[in-house]
Amino acid sequence: EDSPEFMAFGTHSQRAAVISAGIGLSLVLFIFLSVFFEFDWYHHEKGVDIGALVGLLLFLFVGIAIHWYVIRGIKSGQPKYLVPLIIIYAMTLVIEAIFFIFVVNHIVVLNYLKSMPPQSTSGYLFVTAMFVFTMGVQGIMLTAVIRCRNYLEKRQIHDLEMRVAEKSKLQHPSIRIVFGAGDPEMNSSSNNDVQPPADEAPPPYEHATQSSNETTQPEASVAPQRTVLQAQDGIL
């Protein structure tokens, strides 16, 4: 629980992921309401701009769904619900990075040609600063969700191992379940039970071979297959 692997920005990854999901939901609702009430829907002669309305509703549905799945995945302990947000945020960051490179390149070229008025230069700088800030916030949120998914996946594996261990303990009550590195005293006692005493030396190699030959000699006399094979080789 308290491992640095599962921490994000000074707090636990679960809390950081919940905060990120809450911020994401708030931003999605804010952007939807701002665009919905500020956009000129009737600038076309035929009526409402259907394409813009469908795109805005799709943005609202996808944004709410992926952020709500993060909260649901943390509540149920299922890391699979965090995957949609990770995929969409990663794709968004890649697209924003490409667009950011294009904007910076455009600013550099226009400044080199000295064809950009001062007002447009300040506008490009403002857009660049907004892109950097937005990408930084999205990167922080993505990092928190990725670490939370790692934590939920490790906890799910641990719970599965514990269920298997408990089931095995019910079938075999003599086994002991060791958590983590285990108890050193218990490990030393188990090693003492398994290992032979130090004062009893193992039998010499010759004695071991003689005893093994003595135990296997009756079987060889019962089935003298080697003698038959030697006779066949001599005949051939």
Image: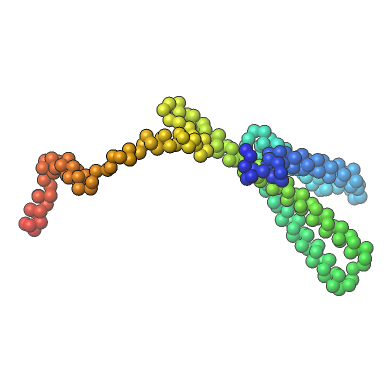
Residue visible at 79% across and 56% down? 132
Quick check: 164 above or below 61? Answer: above
x and y percent of residue 183 in the render? 49, 35
Question: In the orientation shown, which residue stands out farthest toward the front?
Answer: 199
Label count reads 0
Which quarter shows the N terminus?
Answer: top right
In this rendering, does residue 79 appear at all?
no
Q: How is the image coloured?
A: rainbow
Q: Quadrant of residue 94?
A: bottom right
Instruction: Indicate left or right for 51 with 186 as reference.
Output: right
Residue visible at 67% across and 43% down? 7
Instruction: Indicate left or right for 180 with 115 as reference.
Output: left
Q: Quadrant of residue 147?
A: top right
Residue visible at 17% across and 45% down? 210
Q: Quick one: 202 or 222, which is closer to the camera?
A: 202
Residue visible at 93% across and 66% down? 118
Question: In the orientation shown, which residue stands out farthest toward the bottom?
Answer: 113
Quick check: 88 above or below 152? Answer: below
Q: Quick one: 1 or 42, which is closer to the camera?
A: 1
Which quarter shows the C terminus?
Answer: bottom left
Q: Quadrant of residue 214?
A: top left
In this rendering, does residue 220 appear at all?
yes
x and y percent of residue 24 in the render? 77, 43
Instruction: Indicate left or right for 191 with 55 as reference.
Output: left
x and y percent of residue 224 in the render? 11, 45
x and y percent of residue 50 in the render? 83, 46
Q: Quick one: 183 or 69, which is closer to the camera?
A: 183
